[in-house]
Image (tube, rainbow, N blue to C red):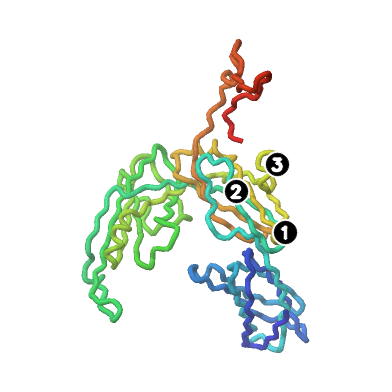
Amino acid sequence: MTVELSPAEMQRVFLAVPAGVERMHLDVKHTAADSVARRFFIQAFTPSAESHQGRFKVDEVAWVDEGERFQMNIPVQAGGVTELALNQYFYSHGETALELDMQWVGVGAGHGTVTMEPNQGWLPVELNPTVDGEVNVETSLEQAVSVYLPKETTDFYDDERSVLPPTPRNPGPKKERRVRLSYALEFKKPMIAALLGQQDYDLSDGIRGGRVMAVHESGEVLYNQCPDGDRPIDFQKGKTTVIADFAAFRSGLVDTIKTLPLRVGQPIKPAKSLGVRPHFRGRFDGNTSSHLSLKAGRDVMLMLADTVVGAMAKLEPKPDYVVGEMTFSDDEENEIVSLPLRYFVGGIAVRRDESRSQTLAGERPQKRGGKAGGSDDRVETGVCT
């Protein structure tokens, strides 16, 4: 596809995204009658009804000579419509054209959270690709999360500065109600961890606030700002009290606020990974491989093996779950899609007692009764087949 441009002019291209696709690789070549370098702005955007506007949006500013190329790796929403807005800057004079080479890329994994339950052993992950492709898959468990519920809650009305005046849609005035939550943490030894916030989803439509203050029993303030998973805290040995403040105009949200947990994330270094078997039939006797050759219309059932159960069971303090990512990429290490990965910690397997597996001296296995003149030598094993 070729798009012709003039200075300060924008051209828009709309593309229907096929099912089972997560990315569009866009190769752009600048062509013109002269050899002048020009500057372009390209924005790719796929609107989604229930997602943040920046989730499927990429901007690129490129200053390129005539004949040169540049590439974009664009996240898209399967089944949606992607808009490409192409603009030539007003000070880049002369008529020009951009040659667009588009390639749909995807594994058909969707965008849901991949969850492994305690001692599950194997976790199937279904892929439904609609395009061919060579894909690499990688799992990474990076943070152990402990969840704390509020120990004390207090709610009260704020002063006149937080009164919402009446409007045609909202009869008022309405007073904002504040809720203060107190969490009690205790660590047997110093630990570096981060506060991850109360939930993964956005609370801001009805609830505001969320600033927290962590105070050690010695009186030292360890933290005093909104939760930031990228800012670790040096928790000291002993008891720490965390205070969180929220506010809402809707009285019905007060009870919801009072149940919001505090999540503390401890980094796992080095990060752990799960074993990957490239197909269902090879989960027991196949080879572990992170490379997939996908064919359009052929479903794939990846099997993730719980190879870290022993290491996770030894984490201190014992987390409620572990979070990370399952990432699919092409052979040039361009990300296709990254899925949230959640691992619930189980227990260590009990060592087998070999002595009990041997038939005791003088004992013979029980046999099923057969027809007259014959016998059935099959041993009762208790296995469902």
Between 68 and 11, the one nearer to me in the picture? 11
Disc 3 versus disc 1: distance between alpha carbons?
20 Å
In the picture, the quarter occupied by the N terminus is: bottom right
Residue denoted by label 3: 286
Whether residue 335 is visible: no
> Farthest front residue?
372
Depicted 249 relative to depicted 126: above or below: below
Circle 3 crowding by C-alpha within 10 Å: few under 14, some 14–19, many from 20: few
Amino acid type, label 1:
Lys
- Of residues 86 and 188, the one drawn nearer to the viewer in this rendering: 86
Q: Residue at x 61, y 18 (%)?
A: 365
- Image quadrant assignment for residue 363: top right
- Above or below, 236 relative to 50: above
Give above or below for 61 relative to 308.
below
* In the displayed structure image, the side of residue 272 where residue 236 appears, left or right: left
Residue 357 image offset from top left, x and y in percent: 59, 21
Alpha carbons under labels 3 and 2: distance apart: 15 Å
Q: Which mark is residue 124?
A: 2
Rendered image: mark on residue 295 = 1
Q: Position of residue 296 (x, y in %)?
A: 71, 61
Q: Earlier in the sequence, mark 2 or mark 1?
A: 2
Element assignment for label 3: loop
Q: Position of residue 193 (x, y in %)?
A: 45, 48
Q: Nearer the N terminus, badge 3 or badge 1?
A: 3
Determine the residue positioned at 24% across, 55% down.
154
Residue 380, quarter of the rendered image: top right
